[in-house]
Amino acid sequence: MTKKEATRDRYGVILKKLAEKDKNIIVMDCDLGRSTRSYSITEVDKKRFIEMGISEQDMISTAAGLAHEGKIVFANSFAVFIVGRAFDQIRQQLALANLNVKVCGSSAGLTEGPDGATHQSIADVSLMRSLPNMVVMVPADGPQTEAAVIAAYKHKGPVYLRLSRYDIENIYSEEYKYDIYKAVELSGGKNIAFVTCGPILSNVVSAVKALNEKGIDVGVINVPTLKPIDKSSIRNFALKYKKLITVEEHNIFGGLGSAIAEVVSVMEEKEKANICMVGVNDTFGESGTAVELLSKHKLDVISLVNKVIEISK
Amino acid sequence: MESDALIKLENRVNEARINLIKMFGIGKSHHYGGSLSCADILTALYFYKMNYSLEKMNDKNRDRFIMGKGHSVPTQYVMLAMHGIIPFDELKTIKQLGTRLQGHPDINKTPGIEAPTGSLGQGLSYANGIALAGRYDDYNYNIYVMLGDGELQEGQIWEAAMTTNHYKLNNVTVIVDRNKYQSQGSIDELLSIEPIEEKFRSFGWHAERIDGHNMKEICIALDNTDKIDKPCAIIADTIKGKGVSFMEGTYKYHNNSLNAEEHEKALQEITKRL
């Protein structure tokens, strides 16, 4: 059995590698460095890790000042806090000023787990998507995270990187051969395709396997970059398929589902896919294990299989 | 300090105030109060203290000024014009569509602006970031941050003050424009912030209070910061709207407009002082 990995783990590994090569990389965190894995940089250079304490707003504005002077900053905390508490600073001093800071929101989604609703971010993607100049990436597994972090590092401007603590088996091979800015049709299907991002891709892939065994042929489309979104591929998929089921560990309002709907709804063609959105149904999470929570919110394999069967009728 | 040099600086302050009134024009709302109150301090920084000029403006080792209380950026625009960085006849385009001179500091549109501010409370953190960057690169510059007294109500200021102290960023200096009024009224009545020096001192800073309209005191305080091995906060007692009698000591001109008559009166009052 392949070992399981969370996207935050691969983030720590690749961040360390990049920091070793480029002395302009600075990493900041708000007392969560060992959890976000941002602390990994201390294994190569303790001096370039800046502990900001529990002050997310201070961290983002300080990161902006460092970026002003040419540093490439990776600023970290839990997704719910970094986006929630420091939204104004991200808006005013990163997005508006167009500064080179990567906002890394860790332990995102329901799968933050037992800590409960206060720690489970379900609106971070929506908030970040709504900012001009912000690139928004939601990698699904280790290899895709590596590609996303490298792309974020190369991009000259602010990036939001959504990272997770949910352990999954990697779906992509280590030689990630796709363009991280493009939607990937992992497998084709007839009439129906799932469209997804983040580690929930793992449940989607398992659901499709189970559906195949029932003789139902469902496609899988992975969209790792939500902004700028790959409009041309998504339009093609909306013409190829009759139904697109978006799946995300995020509120159905404002995240991936909305992003796909924004592209598809303005298409001129009459014959285009209908969209069905699966995600957190505009409710908050609660304490529980990651698996229990995904199940309760109908993001587990069985629920995804049943959703296809339901909409096929 | 030579009295000649002092008089030159004081004249420049009056010139700055005249330029502000001219720039603001007639019938449009502007942040008169807070822009007038900090004219002395900015003149001291840009024409006495800072290692800064048109020739040096892109030097890595230049001193930097950050207008934390972003709505007072008009005064900074005047300083930049006096340094030849912005043409004087461009000043009147402030806040008009398409201008380089935005209502609040914009690092991408305007030359000479060192930080994006406008949402209060963010300037000191940004200054800390610049100071930390300088440390990695072995640069030795000073960063001066002007904060509003109302701005001290923002919690982020105190987060930043903790950081300045913790990382011993002693080349960061705060000047508080203590003009006593915020947008809706007297600070002491709305949400009191005193004692200010004690607050900064308890955060590990050196803090002192001066008369923010006494050029000699301002220059001495600024020179002192070089000798002190701590981040310094200079609390400058000022008069909101200083220089124009009907604007002084009130919240009403935090953001307001002048009609033609008032505009003329304001210009005359300041010109008399030259």
Image (cartoon, grey):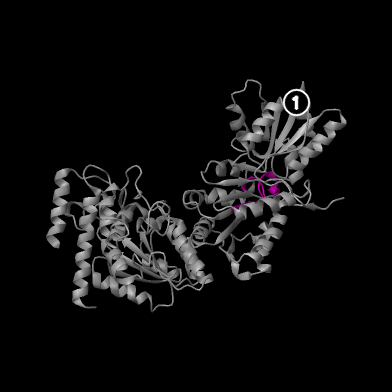
Residue A213 occupies which quadrant of the picture? top right
**Going by the image, does B259 lie left or right of A82?**
left
| Local crowd size for mark 1, using a 10 Å CA cut-off: few (<14), some (14–19), many (≥20) | some
Q: Quadrant of the N terminus of chain B?
A: bottom left
Residue at x-position 12% and y-position 59%: B272
Residue wearing tag 1: A191
| B249 vs A144, nearest the viewer | A144
- Residue B210 position, x and y percent, is 29, 69
Residue at x-position 33% and y-position 75%: B223
- Residue A99 position, x and y percent, is 51, 54
- Residue B69 appearing in the image: yes
**Going by the image, does A213 lie left or right of A65?**
right
| B150 vs A178, nearest the viewer | A178
Q: Chain of mark 1?
A: A
- Residue A281 appearing in the image: no
Taking the view exactly as shown, the residue that stands out farthest to the front is B55
The tally of labels here is 1
- Residue B181 position, x and y percent, is 29, 54
Residue B38 occupies which quadrant of the picture? bottom left
Q: Which residues are magenta?
A: A103-118
